[in-house]
């Protein structure tokens, strides 16, 4: 089995310009390192907010780098430069709205402002892209809510296989899958 190839993209004007240290991307990687037991490699990028920067990075990671899974963080709120969902719409071929619905549902247990989030997920070719919130504390909550479906989704789209530590995340696969 080839190692899964996972992209982590932090979308932030301030982090990309060195205005502050990126904490969200490392929070995603730390959660994945606890949850995934099969071999995997990471392609990590920090980019500015904006439609073109997000669109072009996602296309490059899907079409040229051939990643299996991309987790983005940031750019999903209502602020003027938060354009991750718009860029996603231009990139994905198949939207998976249940991911965003589940992340907002679980996040509402933590903060009432979760209704402002515009996270989503979708498939481009053999890549699953999941938009996560920008707050590091919310990343574990959201990944814990949606990751049980991710390994089987990757199987269905022909991406790399991921196995998980059931102590951290029980991945669901139908019997025989």
Image (spheres, rainbow, N blue to C red):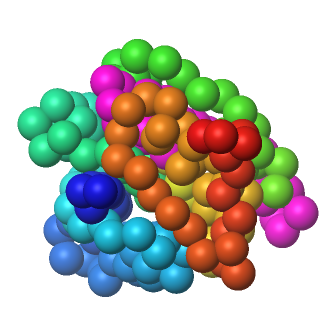
| Residue at the (71%, 33%) spot, across then down | 98
Residue 105: x and y in percent read 83, 48
Point out the residue furthest to the left here: 64
**Placement of 119 over or under 74, stated as above or below:** above
Q: Identify which residue is drawn at 84% across, 68% down.
A: 110
State the residue at coordinates (24%, 56%): 2
For this rendering, which residue is in front, 96 or 152?
152
Nearer to me, 132 or 34: 34
Compared to 95, does 73 lie above or below? Answer: below
**Quarter of the image where the C terminus is located:** top right
Q: Is residue 156 left or right of residue 46?
A: right
Task: Inspect this view and state whether residue 51 appears.
Answer: no
29 to the left or right of 165: left
**Total residue callouts:** 0
> Is-magenta flag for residue 151?
no
Q: Is residue 122 magenta?
A: yes
Residue 176 falls in image quadrant: top right
- Counting from the top left corner in percent of width and height, residue 35 is at 55, 74
Q: Is residue 52 left or right of residue 172?
A: left
Q: Quadrant of residue 19?
A: bottom left
* Residue 40 appears in the figure: yes
Q: Front-most of 172 and 18?
A: 172
State the image quarter where residue 1 is shown.
Answer: bottom left
Name the residue at 49% across, 18% down. Answer: 94
Residue 53 % position (x, y): 21, 40
Bounds of the magenta span? 107-130
- In front: 47, or 98? 98
Provide residue 170's location: percent of width, then percent of height: 71, 64
């Amino acid at each position: 089995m080839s190692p899964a190839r996972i992209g982590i993209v932090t979308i932030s004007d301030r982090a990309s310009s060195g205005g502050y240290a990126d904490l969200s991307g490392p929070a995603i990687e730390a959660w994945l390192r606890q949850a995934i037991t099969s071999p995997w490699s990471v392609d990590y990028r920090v980019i500015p907010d904006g439609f073109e920067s997000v669109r072009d990075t996602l296309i490059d990671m899907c079409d040229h780098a051939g990643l299996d899974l991309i987790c983005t963080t940031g750019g999903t709120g209502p602020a003027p430069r938060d354009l991750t969902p718009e860029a996603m719409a231009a990139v994905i071929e198949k939207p998976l709205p249940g991911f965003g619905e589940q992340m907002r549902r679980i996040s509402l247990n933590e903060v009432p402002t979760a209704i402002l989030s515009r996270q989503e997920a979708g498939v481009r070719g053999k890549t699953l892209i999941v938009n996560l919130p920008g707050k590091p504390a919310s990343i574990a909550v959201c990944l814990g809510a949606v990751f049980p479906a991710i390994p089987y989704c990757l199987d269905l789209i022909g991406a790399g296989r991921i196995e998980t530590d059931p102590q951290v995340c029980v991945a669901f696969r139908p019997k025989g899958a």
